[in-house]
Amino acid sequence: MIVDAAVYERGRRVATEVSLDDVARRPRTPGSFLWIGMHEPTEAEFDAIRHDFGLHPLAIEDAVEAHQRPKLEVYDDALFLVLKTARYDEEARKVDLGELLIFVGGDFVVVVRHGAASALSGVRADLELHPDQLALGPAAVLHAILDRVVDDYTPVMDAIDDDIDELEASVFSDSRENPVERIYLLKREVLAMHRALPPLLEPLARLATKELPHVPPETRSYFRDVEDHLIRISERNDSHRDLLTSVLEANLTRVSVRQNEDMRKISAWVAIAVAPTAIAGIYGMNFEHMPELDTRYGYFVVLAVMAAVCTTLYRLFRRSGWL
């Protein structure tokens, strides 16, 4: 469905509530363009604009089905950009990824949203407050959307930072709880972000440096600024991957150390129990002629020997750190 559609002329909104039936009848004056925002449209909904905008069938198929990797394609005289959006779900403690697919032509911009994509109503409102920037045409809209999406990556990185800090505190605490499942799930979130960030660098580099249709030279510096921002975020995400790998290894080491400590304690108590067990086993034999059987205080002597041996072993194990 259409979320919002409007015609802009020389940076100002001149027609609102444009329906799909109005697309072919829109004004085509110099300096004007149409900006359509759609949310998870069907192929039938695209039919109304496909022929008028001259959209490539392959690009339409990608826009309807989504699930594409970030990329920039040039179809005839139109640009087709795919990028991933991200937001952090505080309740579920996970990253929700969405998808934006953007068609850019000489007099139109069609933005298709899938999933939990970044809200673009604020982008439109901000641009409408700056007619001089909006007068640059569809490239200004493309830059504003890219800038908002890349900016929205920062809160996600901050939330992942907090989660990693919590995991590090949990791993190195005295708690015997094993956070390996949380580490694994967070590592999957970071890998999902990795599939969204680096692939977008190449399209941004092309927008910042190459001659592309409908991208005026004066807008390239804006795309370069977004590219620099994305590079920093991508590097930050890479550091998250390295940190989580280190946290996972540290957790496995801590688990191994705790298991060794448990085994040492068990071995120490078994060793302490061996001495009285051996003495009791010997004197439990049914032999008539055994030493000390007729001693009046033999029972108490044996108990004292058992206690002395156990106490000595206990102190030795405590001194060595086994208990």
Image (cartoon, grey):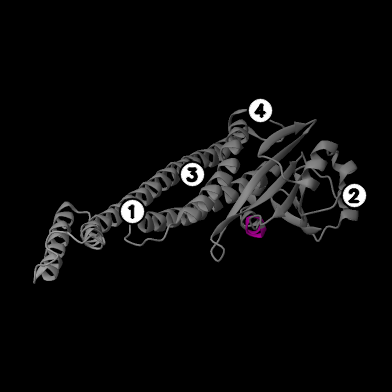
Q: Looking at the image, which is closer to me, 9 or 294?
A: 294
Are the residues at dot 3 and dot 1 in contact (C-beta closer than 8 Å)? Answer: no
- Residue 141 location in percent, x, y? 67, 47
**Mark 3 or 2, nearer chain start:** 2
Magenta stretch secondary structure, dominant: helix
Question: Which residue position holds label 1?
Answer: 258
Residues rendered magenta in the picture: 121-125
Q: Which residue is mark 2?
A: 48
Image coordinates for residue 165, horizontal then vertical, percent: 39, 55
User: Of tags 3 and 2, which is closer to the observer?
Assistant: 3
**Contact, CB < 8 Å: mark 2 with mark 1?**
no
Give the spatial CA distance, label 3 vs label 4. 30 Å
Looking at the image, residue 27 sits to the left or right of residue 297; the answer is right
Residue beneath the point at 37% across and 60% down = 176
What residue is shown with label 4?
Answer: 211
Looking at the rendered image, the quarter that the C terminus falls into is: bottom left
Write down the residue under mark 3: 237
Mark 1: secondary structure: helix
User: Dot 3, crowdedness within 10 Å: few (<14), some or many (≥20)?
Assistant: many
- Check if residue 185 falls in the magenta segment: no
